[in-house]
Amino acid sequence: MGRDVIATAVRYTLQVLAERAKGNTVEVRVPPFAAVQCIEGPGHTRGTPPNVVEMDAPTWLALVTGTLDWVSGVEAGRIHASGQRADLRGYVPLAGLGLRPGS
């Protein structure tokens, strides 16, 4: 998969997450492509947010398509989550995207 396709897939799926989990309590980062804020609760307005989830693009795409589950990703060190609310269980995988793993 080419870099442009990966970038588009990451940005699109992060936007879907932000729309489905409205809020600004958790910042989800997939460098270098994008970051979004999501999940209701206490928010932040400046500086580094207290709840951050970060991973690379292949990990993010595996997570949203269901080929990687949250716990396995965290335990393997592929997902870095800091803060009490930095947990995407219940939000991923993103159902109804029309994506097929490996496509």
Image: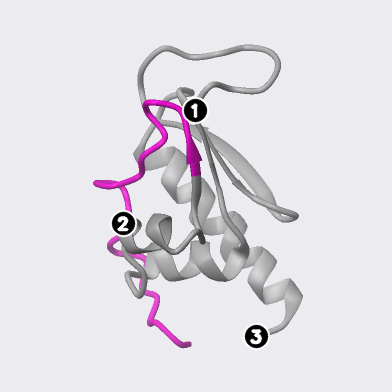
Q: Which residues are magenta?
A: 81-103
Query: What amino acid type is highlighted by mark number 3?
Result: Met
Marks 1, 3: nearer the viewer: 1
For image coordinates 66% across by 22% down, the residue present is 48
Looking at the rendered structure, the secondary structure element under dot 2 is helix
State the image quarter where residue 46 is shown.
top right
- At 49% from the left and 28% from the top, the residue drawn is 51
Q: Secondary structure at mark 3?
A: loop
Is mark 1 in CB contact (under 8 Å) with mark 3?
no
Vertical relation: 62 (above or below) 64: below
Count of labels shown? 3
Q: Is residue 30 visible?
A: yes
Q: Which mark is residue 37?
A: none
Q: Which residue is mark 2?
A: 71
Question: x, y percentage for residue 6?
Answer: 65, 72
Query: Which one is earlier in the sequence, the residue at label 1 or at label 3?
Result: 3
Q: Secondary structure of the magenta portion, mostly?
A: loop
At 59% from the left and 61% from the top, the residue drawn is 10
Q: Residue 70: where, in percent of width, then height?
A: 34, 56
Labelled disc at residue 1: 3
| Near-viewer residue (4 or 32) | 32
Residue 94 visible at all: no
Q: Please state which amino acid type lies under the numbered disc 2.
A: Val
Q: Is residue 29 magenta?
A: no
Q: Is residue 87 left or right of residue 16?
A: left
18 displayed left or right of 58: left
- Quadrant (top left, top right, bottom left, bottom right) of the N terminus: bottom right
What separation in Å lies between label 3 and label 2 (alpha carbons)? 26 Å
How much space separates mark 2 and mark 1, taking CA atoms? 17 Å
The mark nearer the N terminus, 2 or 1, is 1
Which residue position holds label 1?
A: 51
